[in-house]
Amino acid sequence: MINDQLQPFGPVHPVPVVHFSLEFAGVVRHLFQRLRPDAVAVELPNSLRDVVRKGVRRLPEISVVLYQNNTGETFYLPIEPTDPVVEAIRSGLEANVPVHFVDPDLDEYPSYRDYVPDTYAVYRLGIEAYFDIYSREVLPVLKRGPADMRRETGMAYRLQELAAKYNKILFVCGLAHLEGVRAAFFRPQAEPLERIKRTGVGLFHLYPDDLPEVMTEYPFLAAVYEYRRRKLPPKPELSKFTVRRKMGVLTLMTGGKDTWSEEEALDASIRWGVHDMKPGPVDRQMVSYRLFQQAARHYRQDTGEDVYRWQKRTFFRFSRNFAFMENRLLPDFYQLLVSARGCVDDNFCYAFWRLGSFYPWQKRQASIATIRISGEMLWLGTRKIRIRRRLPRIKRRPVYIPKKRRMKERRPGEWLEGFADPYICSYPPEDLVIEDYGNFLKTKGAHVLSADDVVSVPFETTVLDGIDMRETVRHIHEGRIYVREFKRIKGGVGSVVVIFDEDKTGERYPYLMTWLGEHDQESDMAFYATDPADHIVGPGISRCTYGGFLMTYPPLRLADVWGDPEYAWARTRAERLLLAGLEYSLEKHVVYVAEKPPRSFIKQVAGRWGKRIVYIPIGQVSPIRLKQIRTLHVLAGKDKRQIAKDYVW
C-alpha cells in the first residue's frame, strides 16, 4: 500500500529523499526506470546547472563543486554516485530526458542538522514506511524558517511551469520540503527573487587519498553501488592469485611474476563481493559482510594468520551494539574500523581500511584540476583512529659479508715515496658525489627563495600551490580558506658555499687550496681543510677533512682565492670563500650553508654587486650526507687514480 503523501500531485511524481544516501539513490533509480518520466526536476539551483551536469558526466570519477556567496562563505557540493539527486540527474542524462534545476539560489541559508532515521530502514521497510515514520516523528519538531518557505514556493513555481509542458515529472527533493512544495503547488505563485547567475563556480577532481574522509558513503560501498548500477564486470578468479608483500605494498603475483598491481587486486576484491550478492538494490549489511570477508583474505595473505570464527562473531556483535549506541541500525565505516581493531588486531584493521577506502575509478590525475580536501576543513565532525601495524619479523640465516682489508706499508716510508710527483688531483668518485650534492643545494636554495616570496590569498577558483593553514587559521573568523602562491624567482643559483667549521684561528684546517675543473661537468673549487700530511693512507694518497669549500660553475675561471688581495678585508676564511662565490657567480643567487648567517655588511656588498645570498642553516640538511661529502682524498699525480680504489675507504 502506497502512502498517500507520496501520491502524485498533478503531473509531478515526488520522491522525498535523504541526501547522499545509498538506499535513496537506489530508490530514485528504480522509480525512474519504472516511471519513464518526460522530465526530471531536482532540488538544486539553476545557477549551478552547467557545472553540476559536467560533474555528473564525469562519473564514476568523483568531483566536487566549490563556490562562495556574497559573505565569502565557501559552499562544498560533492558529485557522488550514491547521492539520490545526482542519480536523478545521471539517469536523466543517460536517457536523454530533460533535467531541470528548480531550487531558488539563495545566498544565505541557515545550517540545520536534522535527525533522520537510519536510511537502511528504506531497504528493509520501503520508502513509504520510512516516510510515514519521518512524518510522524520528525516533521512535527522540525526547525523551519523564512528561507525554507522561499525555497518551497520557488520550487512550486518552477514545477507549475514544467507541469504545463510535461505529463510525467519525476521530482526529487529533501524529505523536509515535500509537504511545503505540495501545498504551494496548488496556489498561484510569483517568480522567486533569486540569484540568476553565479560566478566563480569551480569543478575539481577529488584526490583519491581524501575520499575516506569527505565521501558521505565510504568508498567501498560507493564502488559496489557503481558496479551494481551498470553491467556487472567478469568475476575474478582470485584462487589463481596470491597476494604477497613486496617493498611495503601488496602485489598480486602468479607464477613468480607480477601480473596485477595493488589497485587491481583491491578492485578484484570489490568485484568478487559484488557478484556474490543477490539481485536487486544494494544491501548495506551484505556489503559490510563481503568487506569483512575480503579484508580477512588480505589479512591472511599479508600476515599468514587467519581470522577465527569467534573473532568474526565478536566483530559483528560489537559493531551492531556500537551502532545502536548512536541510534543507527548498521555501523558506519568508522565503527567498522574500531570493531576490526578491537576484535582482531591493528593489521586486520589496516587491511579493512585499505580495502574499504579504495575506489577504483579515482585517479591521482584527471582532465580537470585536482583538489585536496580533508574532513576537518569541511567541519564534518570526522573522527580519527590510529592503526599501529605489527609486521612479523622473518628470521634469516646469517650471511657472511666480506670486510675490506686496509692496506698497510710493507716497509716504513714506502707510501711517502709516492709523493714525488709535484702535481696533485682529486679522486673522481668523490668529485661525482660532491658535484651531485652541489646541484642538490642549488635546488634547495631555489625552493627557499620560492618559499620566501610566497603570497597568501583567499581561495576562489584554484588552490594554486596548496592551502596555507596558518593564514586560514588566522582568518578563521572570516570563514574563508587561504591558499599559497609561490612566485617564480628571477635569476638562478650560481655558486655554492658550505662552511662546516669557521676555524677563525686557522689551526684545525691549515690546508688552503684552489683547483680547477678538468672538464665541462665539473666546477671550480676553493677550500680549506686539514693538513694532508697528517693522514697518509696510500702511496701518494692523503685523506683530508673539509673545513669549508666553494663551488662555482662553469670551470676554468677561478683564480687563487687565498692569494687574491681583493678579499684581504675578509675577517675569516669563510667570508673569503663567500666573497669569491659572489664575484664569480654568473647567476644572481649564491647558496651559503653554515651554522650562522653572514654578517650584514657582506649582504650589503652582495647587494652592491647585484647578488643575493640564500642562507641555509647547516642543521636543515642531512648530517649523514654532510658526513659523506666532508672527506676528500688528495692524490699526488693522475697515475694514483688507478690504485686509489685499494686505499680509499
Image: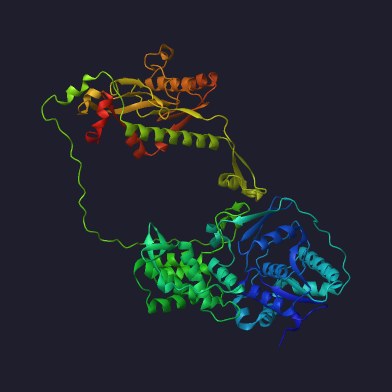
The colour mode here is: rainbow
In depth, the one of 456 and 224 nearer the eye is: 224
Picture layout, residue 377 above or below residue 485: below
Left or right placement of residue 316 versus residue 36 in this view = left
The percent position of residue 132, horizontal first and vertical second, equals 69, 81
In the picture, which quadrant includes the N terminus?
bottom right
Res 353 seen here: no
Look at the image and tell me whether residue 183 can be seen.
Answer: yes
Indicate left or right for 54 with 493 as reference.
right
Residue 194 in the image, given as x and y percentages of width and height: 81, 58
Residue 240's quadrant in the figure?
A: bottom left
Which of these two is toward me, 155 or 409? 409
153 or 233: which is nearer to us?
Answer: 233
Task: Give the left or right position of residue 242, taking residue 46 as reference.
Answer: left
Residue 348 location, quadrant: bottom left
| Callout count | 0
Q: Residue at x 68, y 73 (%)?
A: 17
